[in-house]
Image (spheres, rainbow, N blue to C red):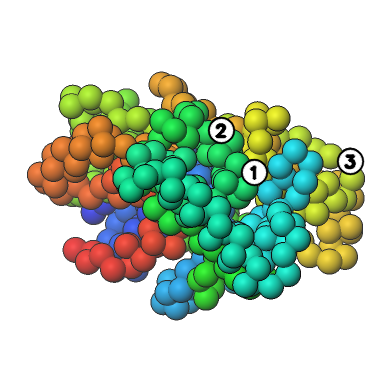
């Protein structure tokens, strides 16, 4: 077997970007992935001519021009703008919270009217606390935006996401909620935003061009005890507690599952992302994938559409871990695992799972671009 400078475990954005940079630096890399395809959670499956985000909606956004220029040097990105809609018991509200939302909620038409309504409801919430700090997510959110927005657009949606009552969730989860006194439905404040033209597989394929890779490979079954025989260094992007055989205990995760179907119509919900914010529906949102890359007449030139219902659940063994659970117990345990990771010779822990931290896509790429490859 060939000898490599780096064995990269996981072909998501961290692993693929690292392999790209290392290869450009003259290093020899082997990238392995336990799934049958490359790309981690950004992998897209083409169905009916539509790039379906198999592991959930991924919208690239950044204000870092270097990161934006880097990804566009691999594949050109389109001008997609994330403007989700919330459906609460059949009524629609624009997100993020802006003047469109406030008009839909209260009929107000000026920022002064909207602010007065919010301030009135915030004051009620603060009076109920009687001088103490918010003790849970519900109390925190009420002091930030008041009861109407909380009850229709936050409460039940958050409970579906976390599987817990808002009164049982810590206040720090929702330290701030963006409130915009303008008619602007662009969810992100970042300067640059879009989707790779042709889907995220083109980005991953570009990053891994010329890099040796193997799929359907279980690192723990095949390489964990022998990786030094084939590589000088290891880049590990799996779950950090699994690497250490859970010897300090298991970290908690939230995970998501999807029910994807083909609809025999060109346009199902008129938007890429619609959040369902009441308990009337068990799913948190519906994704209509074609709207990430098809606009105007091209939506109707493609006669069918693909939609995915997204369900948030508690992680169990055998599932895919998605989101760290940032409560006191998990934060403390993760820090102990990070100390063990720092003491590992010639091992780099990367990505959301490897660091037990929530990252968007652009910061992951920025991390790797700022790394010294030796």
Q: Is residue 96 above or below residue 310?
A: below
The image quadrant that residue 103 belongs to is bottom right
Instruction: Tell me which numbered mark, 2 or 1, is placed earlier along the sequence.
Output: 1
Q: Is residue 344 above or below residue 25?
A: above
User: What residue did someone put label 3 on?
Assistant: 264
> In the picture, which quadrant includes the N terminus?
top left
Q: Residues within 10 Å of mark 1 (few under 14, many from 20)?
A: many
| Contact check, label 2 and label 1, Cβ < 8 Å | no
Compute the Cα span from label 3 to label 1.
Answer: 31 Å
User: What residue did someone put label 2 on?
Assistant: 160
> Whole-percent x and y of residue 332?
20, 37
- Element under disc 2: helix
> Whole-percent x and y of residue 208?
45, 57
Q: Residues within 10 Å of mark 3 (few under 14, many from 20)?
A: few
> Whole-percent x and y of residue 49?
77, 51
| Foreground pick, 222 / 271 | 271
| Contact check, label 3 and label 1, Cβ < 8 Å | no
User: What residue did someone put label 1 on?
Assistant: 152
Q: Residues within 10 Å of mark 2 (few under 14, many from 20)?
A: many
């Amino acid at each position: 077997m060939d000898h490599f400078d780096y064995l990269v475990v996981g072909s998501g954005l961290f692993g693929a970007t690292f392999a790209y940079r290392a290869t450009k630096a003259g290093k020899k890399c082997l990238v392995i992935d336990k799934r049958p395809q490359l790309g981690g959670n950004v992998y897209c499956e083409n169905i009916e001519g539509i790039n379906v985000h198999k592991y959930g909606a991924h919208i690239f956004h950044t204000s870092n021009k270097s990161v934006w220029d880097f990804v566009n040097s691999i594949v050109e990105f389109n001008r997609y703008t994330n403007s989700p809609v919330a459906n609460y018991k059949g009524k629609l509200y624009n997100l993020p919270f802006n003047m469109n939302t406030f008009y839909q909620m209260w009929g107000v038409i000026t920022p002064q009217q909207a602010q007065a309504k919010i301030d009135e409801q915030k004051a009620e919430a603060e009076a109920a606390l009687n001088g103490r700090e918010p003790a849970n997510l519900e109390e925190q959110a009420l002091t930030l935006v008041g009861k109407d927005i909380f009850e229709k657009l936050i409460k039940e949606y958050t409970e579906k996401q976390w599987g817990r009552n808002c009164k049982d969730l810590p206040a720090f989860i929702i330290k701030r909620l963006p409130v915009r006194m303008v008619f602007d439905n662009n969810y992100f404040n970042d300067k640059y935003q879009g989707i790779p033209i042709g889907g995220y597989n083109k980005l991953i394929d570009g990053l891994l061009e010329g890099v040796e890779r193997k799929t359907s490979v279980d690192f723990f079954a095949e390489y964990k005890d022998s990786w030094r025989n084939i590589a000088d260094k290891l880049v590990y992007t799996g779950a950090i507690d699994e690497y250490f055989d859970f010897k300090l205990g298991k970290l908690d995760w939230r995970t998501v599952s999807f029910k994807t179907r083909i609809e025999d119509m060109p346009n199902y919900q008129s938007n890429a992302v619609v959040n369902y914010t009441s308990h009337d529906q068990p799913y948190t949102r519906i994704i209509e994938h074609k709207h990430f890359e098809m606009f105007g007449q091209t939506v109707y030139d493609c006669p069918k559409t693909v939609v995915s219902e997204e369900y948030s659940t508690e992680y169990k063994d055998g599932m895919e871990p998605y989101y760290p659970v940032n409560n006191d117990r998990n934060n403390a345990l993760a820090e102990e695992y990070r100390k063990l990771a720092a003491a590992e010779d010639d091992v780099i822990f990367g990505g959301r799972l490897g660091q037990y931290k929530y990252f968007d896509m652009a910061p992951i790429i920025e991390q790797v671009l700022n790394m010294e490859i030796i």
